Image (cartoon, helix red, strand yellow):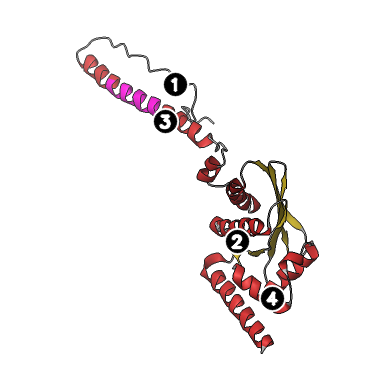
Amino acid sequence: MKRIQQYFILAILSSCLVAQVNDGSQAKPTAAVLDFEGSGITTQEAQVLTQRLGSELVQTDALIMVERNQMSEIMEEQGFQQSGCTSAECAAEIGALLGVQKMITGSFGKIGNSYTIEARMFAVETGETEKTVSKTYKGEVDGLLTQIQIVAWELVGLQAPQDLLAKAGIQPPMEEVAEAPKKKSGSKWFRNTLILLVLAGGGAYAAMQAGGDVDLPEPPDPPTSGMFMIGGGK
């Protein structure tokens, strides 16, 4: 009876993963997160932070995550305990059991008033570490929630949303903001020059009809910055 339940759980998990793949997510690898170890913090705090990491990994939309309750049921059926699985070999074995491609493990620590976060993601098939993220945070333990959310984005190689960065006191990059005025400046110069040439052309035509000499006005100086250049220059 116990083995039948195990096969039933595995069938449900496989069906869920296949459904997500057929739903246009074939490029996304499957992954699972093991409970991070805690040193200097309570087991409950370590579990809460691990859960937050898993939830934020879902928000990145870069991985197909195995739900925590499904993973716990399968591990219990096979006699595995997350708390005793600290080596890469053990994590890879659990990953193979779950049928995922990536496993994420790590630890939280506290030294004085500072907290450390060590997270790594590795391929189950080869056991090779693909990405590691390390952070040191000084402050209340609640602040670790934001830090672990940022870690989730960095693990999958993406930049965290600006609201998370601002919450952590990190200044988001300003390249896009700085680039916008340059483009606008070049466009405005081109528009003004075109209008001036049209008006000057009309005045010159009227003067020639009257038989007079024509002095055309000088066009405005081009902007010193911006991407636009007359003549198709680069």
Badge 4 crowding class, 10 Å Cα cut-off, few under 14, some 14 to 19, many 20 or more, is few
Mark 1 and mark 2 in contact? Answer it, CB < 8 Å.
no
Instruction: Name the mark nearer the viewer: 1 or 3.
Output: 3
Numbered label attached to residue 100: none
Q: Position of residue 183 (x, y in %)?
A: 45, 31
Residue 125 seen in this snapshot: no
Q: Could you tell me residue 68's position as x and y percent? A: 61, 67
Question: What residue is shown with label 4?
Answer: 76
Of marks 4 and 2, the one in the foreground: 4
Dot 4 amino acid type = Glu
- Where is mark 3, residue-wise? 184
Check if mark 4's residue and mark 3's residue have beta carbons within 8 Å: no
* Cα distance between the residues tagged 1 and 3: 13 Å
Q: Secondary structure at mark 3?
A: helix
Residue 103 spot, x, y in % from top left: 70, 63
Q: Earlier in the sequence, mark 4 or mark 3?
A: 4
Q: Quadrant of the N terminus?
A: bottom right
Q: Of the residues shown, which amino acid type is indicated by label 2? A: Leu
At label 2, counting other C-alpha atoms closer than 10 Å, the crowd grade (few under 14, some 14-19, many 20 or more) is some
Looking at the rendered image, the disc whose residue lies closer to the viewer, 1 or 2, is 2
Q: Which residue is mark 1?
A: 222
